[in-house]
Image (cartoon, rainbow, N blue to C red):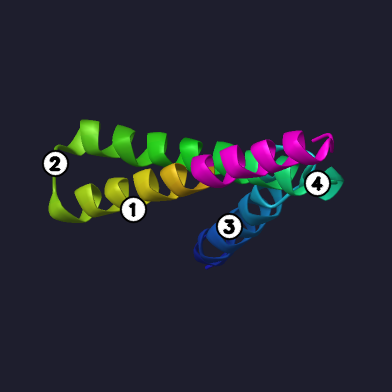
Amino acid sequence: TLDDKIEFERPGKLRGTAISEYFSTKQGPFENVDQITSEVEGVKHALAFEETTLELYRGIRAKLGPSEPLDLLVGMEEGHVKRLSGALSTLETMNKLSGASS
């Protein structure tokens, strides 16, 4: 029936819209990613994205309760945040020492 066809097509259209909005450089986690001009800006952007992802997983875990897969995801994201924070600190220190601006 027509209703079945509409229901079948709608998830794909919604998914396509969601994907295009998610990867948009005008909004969402990739906002202004096309305007990054330095390593420091790039790492700051990546760090903000990872911190947001970490909060998402923590929120899911708070809602559903602890579980091995969620705990693993949270731990992985915490590692990403820690490594990116360290990289950012290193880049900023190197830029200060060389007199470069971020």
Is residue 63 something that shows in the picture? yes
Q: CA distance from mark 2 to mark 3?
A: 29 Å
2 vs 3, front mark: 2
Q: Determine whether the residue tagged by mark 2 lies in a helix, strand or loop.
A: loop
Dividing the picture into quarters, in which one does residue 20 lie?
bottom right
Task: Say left or right for 95 vs 45.
Answer: right
Q: CA distance from mark 1 to mark 4?
A: 26 Å
* Residues shaded magenta: 85-102
Pointer 2 or 3: first along the chain = 3
Pointer 2 or 1: first along the chain = 2
Q: Determine whether the residue tagged by mark 4 lies in a helix, strand or loop.
A: loop
Q: CA distance from mark 4 to mark 3?
A: 32 Å
- Residue labelled with disc 4: 38
Pointer 1 or 4: first along the chain = 4
Position of residue 24 relative to residue 63, above or below, is below
Name the spot of residue 28 as percent of width and height, x first: 66, 39
2 vs 1, front mark: 1
- Residue labelled with disc 1: 76
Give amino acid for label 3: Arg
Give amino acid for label 4: Ser
In the rendered picture of this protein, how many numbered marks are placed on residues? Answer: 4
Name the spot of residue 52 as percent of width and height, x first: 49, 36
Residue closest to the eye, 54 or 56: 54
Name the spot of residue 21 as percent of width and height, x first: 69, 47
Marking on residue 66:
2
Residue closest to the eye, 71 or 88: 88
Which quarter of the figure is the C terminus placed in? top right
Give amino acid for label 1: Met
Q: What kind of secondary structure does the magenta stretch mostly adopt?
A: helix
Q: CA distance from mark 2 to mark 1?
A: 15 Å
Query: CB of mark 1 within 8 Å of CB of mark 4?
Result: no
- Residue labelled with disc 3: 15
